[in-house]
Image: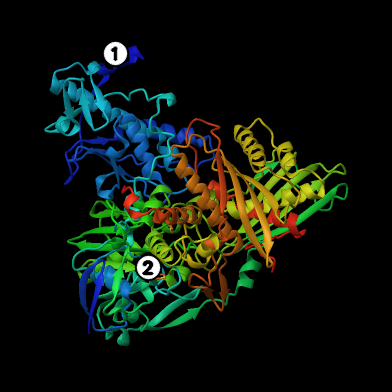
Amino acid sequence: MKVFFKINGLDQSVEIQDGNTPLLWIIRDMLNLKGTKFGCGKAACGACTIHVDGEAVRSCSYSIKSIDGKEVTTIEGLGTEENPHPVQQAWIEHVVPQCGYCQPGFMMATAALLKKIPNPTDEDINDNIVNVCRCATYYRMRKAIHRAAEINSIPSNLKVQK
Amino acid sequence: MKEKMGSKRKRMKRRKFLKYSGVGIGLMLGATWLGRNPLRRAVFDLGETMLPPYVGNTSPLVWLQVSQKNEIILHSSKVEMGQGTFTSLAQLAAEELEIGFDKIKVVHAASISGNVDGFSTGGSTSIATLWNPMREMAATMREMLKAKAAEKLGIDIADLSVTKDCKISSGTKEISFGEIVEGVADWYIPETPVLKDASKFQYIGKPLARVDLNDKVFGAPIFGMDASYPDMLYASVLRSQLVDAKMSNFDFSEAENMPGVVKIVSENGFVGVVAKSQIEAEAARQKIKFDYKVNKDWSLADVEKAITVGNGTKTVFQKVGKAIDEKDKKSELVRMEFRSPIGAHAQIEPSGAVANYKDGKVEIKISTQVVNITRKEVAKALGISKEDVNIIPTFLGGGFGRRLHTPNAIEAAIMSRAVGKPVKSFFSRKQEFQNDTFRPPSHHVMQARLSDKGEILALEHSIAGGDTAFNSALVPFSIVKPIIRADIGSIRGGAINYDGIPNHRGTYYHVDLPFATSFWRSLGLLSNAFAIESFMDELAIKTKQDPIQMRLNYIKDENPYHARLKKVISTCAEKAGYTDEVVNGRAMGFAATIDAGTPCAQVVEVSIVDNEIKVHKVTAVMDCGLAVNPDQVKAQVEGCICMGISAAMFEKMDLRDNMLHPTIYGPYEMALMRDSPKEIDVHLIQGVDVPMPVGEPPLGPIGAAIGNAVRRLTGRRLVEMPLSLG
Ligand code: FES
Ligand code: FES
């Protein structure tokens, strides 16, 4: 089957035999976007978190056929060094990553959370950010999530781009 | 100083530099000359400090290179797994090169470059052992560049200085590093210059941002699992799901016919499926039929029975004064037992490797903590020379000791040879949980003798545990067993630091387990400290003493490490405002440890919510000597605390019908965001003026500190990890 979708703003089509193939492998091995990580393949760690139509999903457990006509964003499309997403900017300010492997998943989950709840409480964060970080950078992540919400709340015309 | 400078020129030696194939302009600073000198000096310096010795490579090392962009590339023999070593090395190098910190790019040294660490990246020793060698190499390179610049510019070297943007300038004339090295084949290597005084440090001791920050925030493909080659195939290796069992009678007929399968490789004692995609390789692997031959039935109860003080090979590893005589009735005997579970590494990037075998040579991109061992093992398995194996280390998606064993490199290499194409082979998550090299479970017996005045007359710690350092590639059992007998990993943190207690000892019982156990961040420290520091707390309660003061009373000042431990203990109690009282439903718990020469104390604030333990705040004080990057040292303390909470309160592997489980995150419970303290207050003390280990020592106190807080809150003494009110 052929699946048409948008990824990081660009039109993409994929010819695939098995429509149930997890999106993660299409993104990583066919489209060569390696920022989305494999951690478990069973929707249990969140390393593979991406956005489909703005919602956070775990791409290891999301079939390629179900994104037909949808818009996918990966960490590569979240922001750039020149124009970082507020979440990325906050992550940089708080020097969150250690090994870094889980971080794209956390940043994607956070970006989606902030769309739903622009100013999350600690409880909101506990309930919604349920990925696994083995380096256990949770303390800085929490601070960075609050900081990202703060950056977000600055009207964009006043925002100083890094 | 003046005299030194004057005599220096005369002693300059003429040396030919190694050419670095391929990249950049060819100025490389070889370190053979250092290998004999400062590297080894560092080893001896560190011999005094309870650190495992650094095994420096004596083959030519290559560290620094001028790039075409007129920057410095630092080829690190230590790998970056989150601990921040790359950043600190860049700080050390920039300091002595006197260039901008942003002008240093740190990369993993491929083994073919010659810069191979002889031992491992582990034990929290990277910066402690490279503190002098790295700075000396940078200082030497600076002087070499200046000397050559003086020659090329025709200006006296005394009138030249280095600029932040990698030039050498007299104020009126300047020449870039790139221009300096252009066309130079031979270099004068001066004697090692005098290193900068600490008061002049510009980068060392500053909280600079990690050098890998942008790569990690914008999703750059830097990990082993991101590595690839054109035309690469994917593999999945069959691994036993049962412990103490052998697989045999393989039937590949169904697997072979699965879509995408290229070849089933059965060689060197393993079976692997090579296919066109990861998914296809795994699907086909699951269709291989075989029989298990179970040697002996095992359950967790059997393991716990085996891991019991009194079983196994006994070694006394600490012995001061007399042993406790259990029959003696003259003074009170206090005895408690503690247990810790089987722990999984659960690092998020699974183990694996990408190998490209061609014409008798193989290149392997891999997350490894043991570049040299990986290279040697692959060479041996393939029957080729070490020089024909190039290990290209990638960033590690977590290390924690998991990547001190890399048989996956051999498997990938053999499969690549078998199919004549590059092969990527990774563990599935289930395999990662079932075929981990686990943290061995442990059993501890603590005993003390108390006088009728409540003085501690004797204190003893007995540990039973499985392999930690033993049977690892780093410490082959056959060589080490007769010499040291006690597993140096299992006893880490197990000695009694309360040397004011007249009689104290440590005894270790080594037990063989039916599954692989090995290094897990901080090794025995977490569980040993849990036993010792919980027991000390209990003794304080029993003898109605302040737990802080009691500890201080029993530590003598003579040993400098113990003096630093005392300072850390009192500072931590003070910073946290430690009290025995329960305030607003919250209690504090205290514990302190010294690991690899770095003392650390922690106070936790805990409450009970719905019969569950909740950690609100942790105050940590650590003396890791000179913190090259205080922000990243703090990050390590925070990480150790949260990882320690996870290990001490949530994690455990079970064994039923010879099968280890759970095999997935979630059922393998771990501390997540909601379980991590909202406040972590870290204070660093600089008790010595050199860097000391950082990445593991803060894991010591956390388990005991939580248990001690729960004791004060509920009256219950928790003696088993994971801690639970049940
Ligand atoms: S890889 Fe998708 S949740 Fe773990
Ligand atoms: S930063 Fe290493 S797993 Fe999260």
Amino acid tagged 1: Gly
Measuring 37% from the left and 43% from the top, which residue is drawn there? B87
For the residues labelled 1 and 2, the Cα–Cα distance comes to: 61 Å
Residue at label 1? B6
| Residue B304 occupies quadrant | bottom right
Amino acid tagged 2: Cys
Measuring 66% from the left and 52% from the top, which residue is drawn there? B605
Foreground pick, B144 / B379: B144
Label 2: chain? A
Q: Could you tell whether B234 is left or right of B503 in the image? A: left
- Locate the C terminus of chain B and report the quarter of the image it occupies: bottom right
Name above or below for residue B107 compared with residue B363: above
Foreground pick, B99 / B314: B99
How far from the left and from the top, in percent, is residue A98? 42, 52
How many numbered marks have been drawn onto this rendered protein structure? Answer: 2
User: Which disc is residue B397 wearing?
Assistant: none
Label 1: chain? B
| Residue B715 occupies quadrant | bottom right
How far from the left and from the top, in percent, is residue B496? 67, 44
